[in-house]
Image: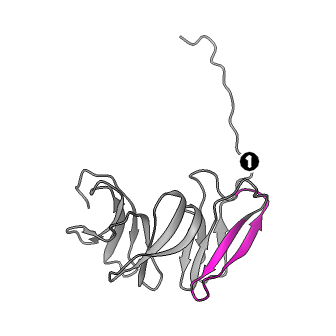
Amino acid sequence: MTTNPANDGNPSWSHDGQWIYFDSARTGEAQIWKIPANGGEAIQLTRDGGLAPLESPNGKFLYYVKNLIDTTLWRIPVEGGPPTKIVEGLSNYVNLAIVDTGVFFVPVPTRETTRFSVQFLSLASNKIEPVAISEKPLDFGAAGGLSISPDGRWILYTQFDQAGSELMLVDGFR
């Protein structure tokens, strides 16, 4: 769909299926773009940086992050307008789920963190509350994931039970 030699990635559909949002470094830094789903010219949407775009369920806003990990969530109106900072301290761009009433996310763990959580930011009250608590990490570097069922009754998240590596000796290596 895109032919620009820059790195184009993190695509997502608009809810009406007419557009594909993506990030691209074609201007020298990562920005959010959209392209018609049936082909055509890409249109730049952000000027202050952006990655991993996701349209809100009602199709009114486009959410994006400034970095892929340890980042801030922003949004702009789909029809155009100034960006608004929504939440700071998002652990990872995949640890995010947007619903009509707000945003579920996994915050950046701190050195003092002994419990990990999934948080919910209510867009109506602008308050953040924990919705799931875990003794085990919910963010592990660039890995993770968070999803809400379509009816809003269930949440899926990645919990890391163990991480490790093994040493191997190759006998007779040349």
Magenta stretch encompasses residue 119:
yes
Choose between 64 and 171: the one closer to the eye: 64
Choose between 15 and 45: the one closer to the eye: 45
User: Which quadrant of the figure has residue 121?
Assistant: bottom right
Magenta stretch encompasses residue 83:
no
Query: In the rendered view, how is the structure colored?
Result: one colour
Q: Residue at x 64, y 64 (%)?
A: 107
Residue 40: tell me if it is visible. Answer: yes
Residue that sits furthest to the bottom in the current view: 124
The quarter of the image holding the N terminus is bottom left
For the image shown, how many numbered marks are present on the structure?
1
> What is the x, y in percent for residue 117?
71, 66
Judge whether 105 appears above or below 61 on screen: above
Residue tagged by mark 1?
162
Q: Which amino acid is tagged 1?
A: Gln
> What is the x, y in percent for residue 109?
68, 58
Q: Residue at x 64, y 77 (%)?
A: 120
Q: Residue at x 75, y 58 (%)?
A: 113
The kind of secondary structure the magenta stretch mainly shows is strand
Locate residue 131 relative to residue 173 in the image: left or right: right
Residue 150: tell me if it is visible. Answer: no
> What is the x, y in percent for residue 70?
56, 58
Magenta span of residues = 117-137
Judge whether 44 appears above or below 24 on screen: below
> What is the x, y in percent for residue 2?
25, 59
User: Which quadrant of the figure has residue 82?
Assistant: bottom left
Give the crowd class for mark 1: few <14, some 14-19, many >=20 residues within 10 Å: few
The kind of secondary structure element at disc 1 is: loop
Locate residue 47 relative to residue 87 in the image: left or right: left
Judge whether 153 appears above or below 12 on screen: below
